[in-house]
Amino acid sequence: MIFKRLTMIKMFLGAVGMSMLSVFLLILFNESIYQSVRNGFIHKINRIGAFHLAMGGSLIGVGMVLAGSCPGTIFIQM
């Protein structure tokens, strides 16, 4: 983690920026769709208990340790 080449941080910040822009445009042009999606997400999250969240986080953490990388790069590794 010397941070000599900032390629990954540029990619992540670009993705964050595009996500923010898309949400802004969605709210600007059609707020009712945004409210519907947001309320559905909040309703779904409220139904999931802490045990399920802990188990999911543990499973993905163990998988990342065993595989030695992020799940997003599995096709490149194969």
Image: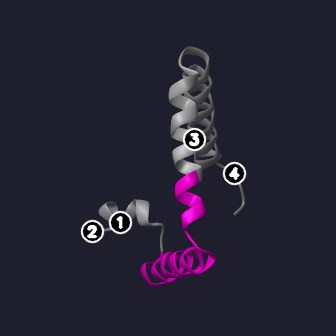
Q: Residue at label 3?
A: 38
Q: Which residues are magenta?
A: 43-68
In screen coordinates, is 40 left or right of 6? Answer: left
Residue under the point 50% across and 28% down = 33
Q: Are marks 4 and 2 in contact (CB under 8 Å)?
A: no
Numbered disc in front, either 1 or 4: 1
Which quarter of the figure is the C terminus placed in? bottom left
Q: Residue at label 4?
A: 4
Numbered disc in front, either 3 or 2: 3
Dot 3 crowding, Cα within 10 Å, few <14, some 14–19, many 20+:
few
Q: CA distance from mark 3 to mark 2?
A: 36 Å
Residue under the point 42% across and 60% down = 72
Numbered disc in front, either 4 or 3: 3
Q: Secondary structure at mark 3?
A: helix
Q: Residue at label 1?
A: 74
Dot 2 crowding, Cα within 10 Å, few <14, some 14–19, many 20+:
few
Q: Residue 78 got which mark?
A: 2
Residue under the point 55% across and 15% down = 29
Above or below, comparing residue 34 to residue 56 in the picture: above
Above or below, comparing residue 18 to residue 71 in the picture: above
Nearest the eye: 72 or 45 = 45
Residue 38 lies, in percent from the top left, at: 57, 41
Which mark sits nearer the N-terminus, 3 or 1? 3
Q: CA distance from mark 4 to mark 3?
A: 39 Å
